[in-house]
Image (cartoon, helix red, strand yellow):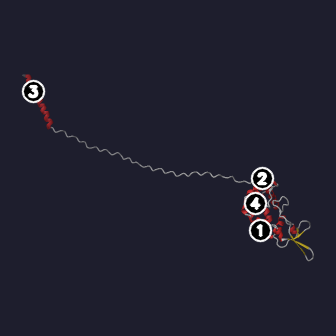
Amino acid sequence: MSDLRTSQWLLAGVLVAVLAGGAYYVLTPPPEEKVEAPVTLPEPPRQVIREEPAPPEPEPQMPEADPIPVEPKPVPAELNFSDEPVRDAFLSLAPDSALAKWLVRDEVIRKWVAAIDSASRGNLMTKHRPMRNIRGPIKVESTVEADGQKSVTLSEQNYERYDTLVRIFALADTGTAVELYQFWYPRFSQAYGELGNKEKSFHKVMLKAIDVALAAPDLKGPIELVQPSVYYKFKDPKLEKLPGVHKLMIRMGPDNALRVKEKLRELKIELEKLPL
Protein backbone atom coordinates (compact mmCIF):
# COMPACT_ATOMS: atom_id res chain seq x y z
CA MET A 1 0.00 0.00 0.00
CA SER A 2 2.75 2.31 0.92
CA ASP A 3 4.61 1.44 -2.27
CA LEU A 4 1.50 2.35 -4.25
CA ARG A 5 1.24 5.67 -2.58
CA THR A 6 4.82 6.36 -3.04
CA SER A 7 4.53 5.62 -6.76
CA GLN A 8 1.48 7.85 -6.98
CA TRP A 9 3.33 10.70 -5.34
CA LEU A 10 6.27 10.21 -7.55
CA LEU A 11 4.04 10.13 -10.60
CA ALA A 12 2.26 13.25 -9.42
CA GLY A 13 5.57 14.98 -8.82
CA VAL A 14 6.75 14.09 -12.16
CA LEU A 15 3.52 15.25 -13.71
CA VAL A 16 3.65 18.56 -11.81
CA ALA A 17 7.22 19.06 -12.90
CA VAL A 18 6.35 18.37 -16.49
CA LEU A 19 3.37 20.70 -16.37
CA ALA A 20 5.38 23.37 -14.62
CA GLY A 21 8.15 23.06 -17.09
CA GLY A 22 5.67 23.18 -19.99
CA ALA A 23 3.91 26.18 -18.51
CA TYR A 24 7.21 27.93 -18.08
CA TYR A 25 8.14 27.16 -21.61
CA VAL A 26 4.70 28.31 -22.85
CA LEU A 27 4.27 31.32 -20.63
CA THR A 28 7.81 32.52 -20.68
CA PRO A 29 8.36 34.67 -23.80
CA PRO A 30 11.21 33.56 -25.86
CA PRO A 31 14.31 35.62 -25.33
CA GLU A 32 14.73 38.41 -27.84
CA GLU A 33 17.12 37.50 -30.47
CA LYS A 34 20.03 39.81 -30.22
CA VAL A 35 20.33 41.40 -33.60
CA GLU A 36 23.85 42.44 -34.08
CA ALA A 37 24.29 45.72 -35.93
CA PRO A 38 25.79 45.20 -39.30
CA VAL A 39 29.47 45.79 -39.18
CA THR A 40 30.55 48.22 -41.80
CA LEU A 41 33.98 47.33 -42.88
CA PRO A 42 36.08 50.16 -44.18
CA GLU A 43 36.58 50.02 -47.85
CA PRO A 44 40.06 49.08 -48.78
CA PRO A 45 42.03 52.02 -50.07
CA ARG A 46 41.79 52.36 -53.75
CA GLN A 47 44.95 51.55 -55.47
CA VAL A 48 45.85 54.47 -57.68
CA ILE A 49 47.49 53.14 -60.72
CA ARG A 50 49.71 55.77 -62.16
CA GLU A 51 50.39 55.43 -65.78
CA GLU A 52 54.06 55.67 -66.40
CA PRO A 53 54.85 57.96 -69.32
CA ALA A 54 55.75 56.04 -72.39
CA PRO A 55 59.47 56.11 -73.07
CA PRO A 56 60.38 58.51 -75.87
CA GLU A 57 60.74 56.94 -79.19
CA PRO A 58 64.37 56.63 -80.14
CA GLU A 59 65.48 59.15 -82.68
CA PRO A 60 66.04 57.61 -86.03
CA GLN A 61 69.66 56.76 -86.40
CA MET A 62 71.22 58.09 -89.52
CA PRO A 63 73.41 55.55 -91.16
CA GLU A 64 77.03 56.39 -90.61
CA ALA A 65 78.55 57.83 -93.70
CA ASP A 66 81.56 56.14 -95.04
CA PRO A 67 84.67 58.10 -94.15
CA ILE A 68 85.82 60.32 -96.95
CA PRO A 69 89.17 59.06 -98.09
CA VAL A 70 91.85 61.66 -97.60
CA GLU A 71 94.00 61.86 -100.64
CA PRO A 72 97.66 62.32 -99.93
CA LYS A 73 98.93 65.82 -100.54
CA PRO A 74 100.76 65.90 -103.86
CA VAL A 75 104.46 66.58 -103.71
CA PRO A 76 106.77 67.68 -106.52
CA ALA A 77 108.82 65.03 -108.24
CA GLU A 78 112.40 64.52 -107.17
CA LEU A 79 114.77 66.95 -108.79
CA ASN A 80 116.48 64.34 -110.96
CA PHE A 81 113.11 63.16 -112.26
CA SER A 82 111.36 66.52 -112.54
CA ASP A 83 112.01 67.50 -116.15
CA GLU A 84 108.82 66.17 -117.70
CA PRO A 85 106.31 67.14 -114.98
CA VAL A 86 107.71 70.62 -114.42
CA ARG A 87 107.89 71.26 -118.15
CA ASP A 88 104.26 70.19 -118.48
CA ALA A 89 103.40 72.57 -115.64
CA PHE A 90 105.09 75.46 -117.44
CA LEU A 91 103.34 74.56 -120.70
CA SER A 92 99.98 74.82 -118.93
CA LEU A 93 100.53 78.55 -118.53
CA ALA A 94 99.89 79.13 -122.24
CA PRO A 95 97.10 77.79 -124.48
CA ASP A 96 97.76 75.23 -127.17
CA SER A 97 101.21 74.45 -125.81
CA ALA A 98 102.45 77.72 -127.25
CA LEU A 99 105.58 77.50 -125.11
CA ALA A 100 106.53 74.03 -126.31
CA LYS A 101 108.97 75.21 -128.96
CA TRP A 102 110.69 77.56 -126.53
CA LEU A 103 111.21 75.49 -123.37
CA VAL A 104 114.15 73.11 -123.12
CA ARG A 105 113.50 69.49 -122.15
CA ASP A 106 116.46 68.65 -119.93
CA GLU A 107 117.56 69.98 -116.53
CA VAL A 108 114.59 72.35 -116.64
CA ILE A 109 114.62 73.41 -112.99
CA ARG A 110 118.39 73.64 -112.69
CA LYS A 111 118.65 75.82 -115.81
CA TRP A 112 115.85 78.13 -114.71
CA VAL A 113 117.36 78.51 -111.25
CA ALA A 114 120.79 79.27 -112.70
CA ALA A 115 119.28 81.82 -115.11
CA ILE A 116 117.32 83.58 -112.35
CA ASP A 117 120.34 83.60 -110.08
CA SER A 118 122.34 85.21 -112.87
CA ALA A 119 119.56 87.71 -113.63
CA SER A 120 119.46 88.78 -109.97
CA ARG A 121 122.98 90.15 -110.60
CA GLY A 122 121.89 91.70 -113.92
CA ASN A 123 123.53 89.09 -116.12
CA LEU A 124 122.16 86.87 -118.89
CA MET A 125 123.04 83.23 -119.34
CA THR A 126 125.08 82.62 -122.47
CA LYS A 127 125.10 78.84 -122.08
CA HIS A 128 122.68 76.28 -120.66
CA ARG A 129 119.73 78.59 -121.11
CA PRO A 130 116.26 77.43 -119.99
CA MET A 131 114.72 78.72 -123.23
CA ARG A 132 115.81 78.47 -126.83
CA ASN A 133 117.25 81.53 -128.50
CA ILE A 134 115.17 83.70 -130.76
CA ARG A 135 116.27 82.78 -134.23
CA GLY A 136 117.64 85.13 -136.78
CA PRO A 137 120.14 87.96 -136.74
CA ILE A 138 119.43 91.27 -135.09
CA LYS A 139 117.62 93.63 -137.47
CA VAL A 140 119.04 97.06 -138.03
CA GLU A 141 118.49 100.05 -140.28
CA SER A 142 121.38 101.73 -142.00
CA THR A 143 121.44 105.30 -143.26
CA VAL A 144 124.15 107.49 -144.67
CA GLU A 145 124.57 110.85 -143.06
CA ALA A 146 125.30 114.07 -144.96
CA ASP A 147 128.96 113.78 -144.09
CA GLY A 148 129.03 110.34 -145.62
CA GLN A 149 129.19 108.56 -142.32
CA LYS A 150 127.10 105.41 -142.00
CA SER A 151 124.53 105.39 -139.20
CA VAL A 152 123.09 102.14 -137.87
CA THR A 153 120.03 102.04 -135.63
CA LEU A 154 118.05 99.24 -134.05
CA SER A 155 115.12 98.49 -136.35
CA GLU A 156 111.58 98.37 -135.01
CA GLN A 157 111.24 95.11 -136.92
CA ASN A 158 113.67 93.67 -134.40
CA TYR A 159 111.07 94.23 -131.68
CA GLU A 160 108.65 91.98 -133.52
CA ARG A 161 110.96 89.03 -132.91
CA TYR A 162 109.97 89.22 -129.22
CA ASP A 163 106.24 89.81 -129.73
CA THR A 164 105.13 86.19 -129.40
CA LEU A 165 107.03 85.46 -126.21
CA VAL A 166 106.03 88.75 -124.62
CA ARG A 167 102.37 88.15 -125.47
CA ILE A 168 102.47 84.65 -123.94
CA PHE A 169 104.17 86.00 -120.82
CA ALA A 170 101.74 88.91 -120.44
CA LEU A 171 98.62 86.75 -120.90
CA ALA A 172 99.68 83.99 -118.49
CA ASP A 173 97.44 83.74 -115.43
CA THR A 174 99.32 85.28 -112.52
CA GLY A 175 97.57 83.18 -109.86
CA THR A 176 98.35 79.93 -111.65
CA ALA A 177 101.97 80.94 -112.18
CA VAL A 178 102.40 81.72 -108.47
CA GLU A 179 100.77 78.41 -107.48
CA LEU A 180 103.18 76.50 -109.71
CA TYR A 181 106.09 78.45 -108.28
CA GLN A 182 105.02 77.65 -104.72
CA PHE A 183 104.43 73.96 -105.51
CA TRP A 184 107.83 73.51 -107.14
CA TYR A 185 109.66 75.81 -104.76
CA PRO A 186 111.26 72.95 -102.76
CA ARG A 187 112.99 71.80 -105.96
CA PHE A 188 113.95 75.37 -106.93
CA SER A 189 115.48 75.78 -103.51
CA GLN A 190 117.27 72.43 -103.80
CA ALA A 191 118.74 73.33 -107.19
CA TYR A 192 119.80 76.72 -105.82
CA GLY A 193 121.57 74.93 -102.97
CA GLU A 194 123.51 72.90 -105.52
CA LEU A 195 125.01 76.17 -106.74
CA GLY A 196 126.66 76.57 -103.34
CA ASN A 197 123.91 78.71 -101.83
CA LYS A 198 122.45 76.31 -99.26
CA GLU A 199 122.15 79.00 -96.60
CA LYS A 200 120.44 81.52 -98.88
CA SER A 201 116.80 81.90 -99.90
CA PHE A 202 116.04 81.37 -103.56
CA HIS A 203 112.79 83.27 -103.06
CA LYS A 204 114.74 86.43 -102.26
CA VAL A 205 116.84 85.85 -105.36
CA MET A 206 113.68 85.60 -107.47
CA LEU A 207 112.34 88.89 -106.11
CA LYS A 208 115.70 90.56 -106.67
CA ALA A 209 115.80 89.36 -110.31
CA ILE A 210 112.37 90.96 -110.84
CA ASP A 211 113.58 94.21 -109.33
CA VAL A 212 116.58 94.22 -111.66
CA ALA A 213 114.32 93.88 -114.72
CA LEU A 214 111.96 96.58 -113.45
CA ALA A 215 114.92 98.96 -113.09
CA ALA A 216 115.71 98.81 -116.81
CA PRO A 217 115.57 102.28 -118.42
CA ASP A 218 112.60 103.17 -120.58
CA LEU A 219 113.96 104.38 -123.92
CA LYS A 220 112.15 105.85 -126.87
CA GLY A 221 113.37 106.89 -130.26
CA PRO A 222 116.12 105.45 -132.43
CA ILE A 223 118.86 103.54 -130.66
CA GLU A 224 122.18 103.86 -132.41
CA LEU A 225 124.47 100.86 -132.78
CA VAL A 226 128.05 100.25 -133.81
CA GLN A 227 129.68 97.12 -135.15
CA PRO A 228 133.31 96.98 -134.13
CA SER A 229 133.44 93.25 -134.88
CA VAL A 230 130.90 90.55 -135.51
CA TYR A 231 128.35 91.72 -132.95
CA TYR A 232 126.57 95.04 -132.69
CA LYS A 233 126.95 97.20 -129.62
CA PHE A 234 125.19 100.30 -128.37
CA LYS A 235 126.90 103.45 -129.57
CA ASP A 236 126.10 105.24 -126.33
CA PRO A 237 128.73 104.10 -123.76
CA LYS A 238 126.19 104.44 -120.94
CA LEU A 239 123.86 101.98 -122.64
CA GLU A 240 126.70 99.65 -123.46
CA LYS A 241 127.66 99.50 -119.78
CA LEU A 242 124.17 98.52 -118.70
CA PRO A 243 123.72 95.00 -117.30
CA GLY A 244 122.66 92.30 -119.74
CA VAL A 245 119.08 92.17 -118.41
CA HIS A 246 118.63 95.88 -119.14
CA LYS A 247 120.05 95.50 -122.63
CA LEU A 248 117.58 92.71 -123.32
CA MET A 249 114.69 94.93 -122.22
CA ILE A 250 115.93 97.61 -124.65
CA ARG A 251 116.31 95.18 -127.55
CA MET A 252 112.72 93.96 -127.23
CA GLY A 253 111.40 97.50 -127.76
CA PRO A 254 109.59 100.00 -125.53
CA ASP A 255 106.10 98.53 -125.99
CA ASN A 256 107.18 94.97 -125.21
CA ALA A 257 109.30 96.16 -122.29
CA LEU A 258 106.27 97.96 -120.88
CA ARG A 259 104.12 94.82 -121.04
CA VAL A 260 106.84 92.72 -119.42
CA LYS A 261 107.22 95.20 -116.58
CA GLU A 262 103.47 95.32 -115.95
CA LYS A 263 103.40 91.54 -115.62
CA LEU A 264 106.46 91.47 -113.41
CA ARG A 265 104.84 93.94 -111.04
CA GLU A 266 101.76 91.70 -110.79
CA LEU A 267 103.92 88.68 -110.08
CA LYS A 268 105.99 90.48 -107.49
CA ILE A 269 102.90 91.54 -105.52
CA GLU A 270 101.69 87.96 -105.31
CA LEU A 271 105.11 86.43 -104.72
CA GLU A 272 105.72 88.75 -101.77
CA LYS A 273 102.64 87.27 -100.09
CA LEU A 274 104.10 83.77 -100.01
CA PRO A 275 105.49 82.55 -96.68
CA LEU A 276 108.76 81.39 -98.17
Q: Quadrant of the N terminus?
A: top left
Q: Decide if residue 150 is on the left or right side of residue 215.
A: right
The mark lying in front, picked from 3 and 4, is 4
Secondary structure beneath disc 4? helix
The numbered mark, 2 or 1, whose residue comes first in the sequence reads: 2
The Cα–Cα distance between marks 1 and 3, rounded to whole angstroms, is: 175 Å
Q: Which mark is residue 259?
A: 1
- Residue found at the far bottom of this picture: 146
* The disc label shown at residue 81, or none: 2
Residue at position x 12%, y 29% in the image: 14
Disc 2 marks a residue whose amino acid type is Phe
Which amino acid, mark 1? Arg
Q: Which residue in the rendered view is the most extreme toward the left?
A: 1
Q: Which type of secondary structure does the marked residue at label 1 adopt?
A: helix
Which label sits in the foreground, 1 or 3? 1
Mark 4 closeness class: few <14, some 14–19, many ≥20 residues within 10 Å: some
Viewer-proximal residue, 182 or 111?
111
Q: Using the image, tell me which numbered label, if any, was put on residue 9.
A: 3
